[in-house]
């Protein structure tokens, strides 16, 4: 009968095996065989660099910031206002004189094409005249607005310059909550007066946040990226970058009680930006959507009036004659309960899902008509006023 090992022998054997495996691991790392596949070459080089050296402090974040910075621009404009001024002295008649003011740092932008295409927010350049961009190296280039989508708050500019540094486009659908991102731009640019971009670092705090702005603009912010990377006035229109140096969003606004950054910033996903940019590049303009029907928030009384038991949704209040809504079969009194498979609780949900679709796309609506569920396919059509221009 074989003799069993004593507890002391087992412990000595385990210690010896651990020592051998430990030395084997050290030998593998020293020969370049132990670096995990997920570690970048820059990180591996930094790990082997002397303590305290620049190489040891170099990270993927540093590499991404250096790579993208030349493509980040400051957006400026000249605006003309009219003021009263005396002709000779204070008691003389007053005349209205033009006053031209140059504002070099209205917001930020990013170059997406070496031939001079620049993306920014629509709200940064709307109403501005003589737009110009300032490069990281101090060059000031005149910019022409090609067009913009006011709904989605995306604008495309063109500068007459070639071989410009351009950012690499990423895929915002692949973003993960918790991954590192960089917000780049020129916050408080008019105070700092320096075209070199500021870099702030944070993580993707949340995905899929949707808002609808109040006021005249009625902008729709759908599936926004939330980040705790500091975003401040002047950052609007600048890029949100992942750790690989790819554009994943356009920094747009913050939620704040103080007016400054409180770690709740939002960026438009780059995949939405691509759709707008491709539309403008392909057609030379952004084609406005025809709005030929209107909806209201449904309530119990409205639902009962049209013979429905729906507790939420958007009820069709009026329809233009011979328009795409009538041709699709939509009727006054229909309650829209879903758009492209997304549940509709109110007018805000409806606008976010329906009026953010591009001209030519087909939107599938599920409606409640007198208690019966129907499916209606509506094709987004270009507004007639846009076609006549």
Image (spheres, rainbow, N blue to C red):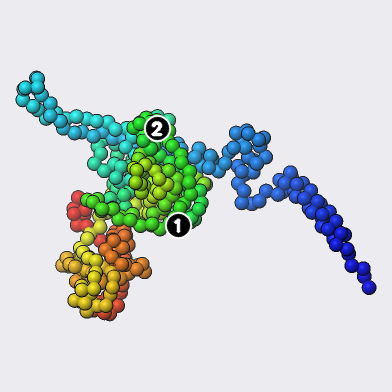
Rendering coords of residue 264 (x, y %)? 40, 49
Q: Left or right: 259 with respect to 382?
A: right
The quarter of the picture where residue 52 lies is top right
Say whether marks 2 and 1 touch (CB < 8 Å).
no
Q: How far apart are labels 2 and 1 at the CA level?
A: 31 Å
Q: Left or right: 135 with respect to 242?
A: left
Q: Pick the residue in front: 30 or 213.
A: 213
The numbered mark at residue 284 is none
Q: Residue at x 30, y 55 (%)?
A: 212
Q: Residue at x 62, y 37 (%)?
A: 56
The numbered mark at residue 195 is 2
Q: Residue at x 31, y 35 (%)?
A: 76
Q: Left or right: 93 with respect to 334?
A: left
Specify few, some or many for label 1: CA neighbours under 10 Å numbering under 14, 14-19, or 20 or more. Answer: few
SS at mark 1 in the image: helix
Q: Pick the residue in front: 101 or 168.
A: 101
SS at mark 2 in the image: loop
Q: Which residue is mark 1?
A: 173
Q: Pick the residue in front: 254 or 285.
A: 254
């Amino acid at each position: 009968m074989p003799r069993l090992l004593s507890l002391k022998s087992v412990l000595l054997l385990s210690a010896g095996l651990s020592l051998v495996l430990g030395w084997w691991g050290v030998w593998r790392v020293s020969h370049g065989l132990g670096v995990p596949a997920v570690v970048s070459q820059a990180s591996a080089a930094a790990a082997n660099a002397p303590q305290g050296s620049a190489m040891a402090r170099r990270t993927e974040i540093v590499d991404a910031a250096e790579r993208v910075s030349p493509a980040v621009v400051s957006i400026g404009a000249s605006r003309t206002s009219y003021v009263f001024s005396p002709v000779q002295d204070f008691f003389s008649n007053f005349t209205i004189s033009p006053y031209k003011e140059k504002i070099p740092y209205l917001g930020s932008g990013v170059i997406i094409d070496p031939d001079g295409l620049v993306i920014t927010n629509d709200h940064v350049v709307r109403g501005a005249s003589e737009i110009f961009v300032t490069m990281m190296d101090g060059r000031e280039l005149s910019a022409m607005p090609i067009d913009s989508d006011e709904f989605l708050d995306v604008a495309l500019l063109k500068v007459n310059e070639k071989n410009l540094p351009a950012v690499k486009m990423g895929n915002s659908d692949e973003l993960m909550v918790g991954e590192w991102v960089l917000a780049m731009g020129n916050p408080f640019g008019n105070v700092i007066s320096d075209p070199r971009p500021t870099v702030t670092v944070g993580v993707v705090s949340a995905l899929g946040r949707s808002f609808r702005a109040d006021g005249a603009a009625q902008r729709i912010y759908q599936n926004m990226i939330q980040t705790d990377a500091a975003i401040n006035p002047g950052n609007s229109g600048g890029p949100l970058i992942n750790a690989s140096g790819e554009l994943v969003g356009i920094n747009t606004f913050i939620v704040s009680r103080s007016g400054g950054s409180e770690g709740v910033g939002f960026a438009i996903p780059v995949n939405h930006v691509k759709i707008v940019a491709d539309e403008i590049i392909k057609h030379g303009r952004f084609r406005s959507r025809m709005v030929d029907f209107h909806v209201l928030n449904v309530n119990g009384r409205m639902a009962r009036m049209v013979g429905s038991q729906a507790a939420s949704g958007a009820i069709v209040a009026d329809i233009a004659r011979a328009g795409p809504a009538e041709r699709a079969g939509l009727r006054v009194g229909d309650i829209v309960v879903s758009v492209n498979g997304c549940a509709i609780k109110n007018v805000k949900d409806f606008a976010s899902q329906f009026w953010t679709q591009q001209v030519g796309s087909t939107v599938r609506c599920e409606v409640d008509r007198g208690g019966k569920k129907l499916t209606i396919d509506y094709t987004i059509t270009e507004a007639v006023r846009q076609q006549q221009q």
